[in-house]
Amino acid sequence: MNLRLKVLFPLLITFSVLTIFILAANTLYAQKVVDYIVVMAANCLFFLISLIVFRMQYKAMFDSNPNVFIRSVMAGMIIKIFACIIAVVAYYFISRSQFNKPAVYISMIIYLIFLVVEVSTIMKLNKSKNA
């Protein structure tokens, strides 16, 4: 297996499983109390942000200065938090009266899932390397 694909495999699997779960939940539930378009958009947003931040941290792991990795982790957290804040505020201003709180709460859970997968993958890679 290609090294890049092997490194990104946990994120790809997480995205795929969440996408299948979201699509299945959308079709199974008759009462639509959750806006699944918002949840799917959040899933895609968090996947893209995780890819960007993961690439940033992966490159920083190979730097001889350990502070570079710490700075990349903190910069990744700031990028994620600001992207989440901007996305929720933009969704609120776009949808005003149709703002769907359950979709935002589910999106927060998706954020936590991607966070756990990304951190665990980086920790495994950091242990395998001479850190």
Image (cartoon, grey):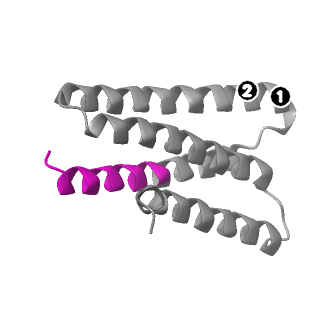
The residue located at (73%, 69%) in the rendering is: 25
SS type, badge 2? helix
Amino acid type of the residue that numbered disc 2 sits on in the rendered structure: Ala
Question: Whole-percent x and y of residue 101?
Answer: 69, 43
**For the residues bearing labels 1 and 2, Cβ distance under 8 angstroms:** yes
Question: Whole-percent x and y of residue 11?
Answer: 49, 57
Amino acid type of the residue that numbered disc 1 sits on in the rendered structure: Ile
Q: Which residues are magenta?
A: 114-131
Say if the magenta span includes residue 130: yes
Q: Is residue 47 left or right of residue 117?
A: right
Taking 50 as reference, is 15 above or below it? below
Residue 35 in view of the camera: no
Q: Residue furthest left?
A: 130
The residue located at (19%, 51%) in the rendering is: 129
Q: Tell me the tag on residue 90.
A: 2
SS type, badge 1? helix
**CA gap, disc 1 and disc 2:** 6 Å
Q: Nearer the viewer, residue 79 or 107?
A: 79
Q: Quadrant of the N terminus?
A: bottom left
Q: Tell me the tag on residue 94.
A: 1
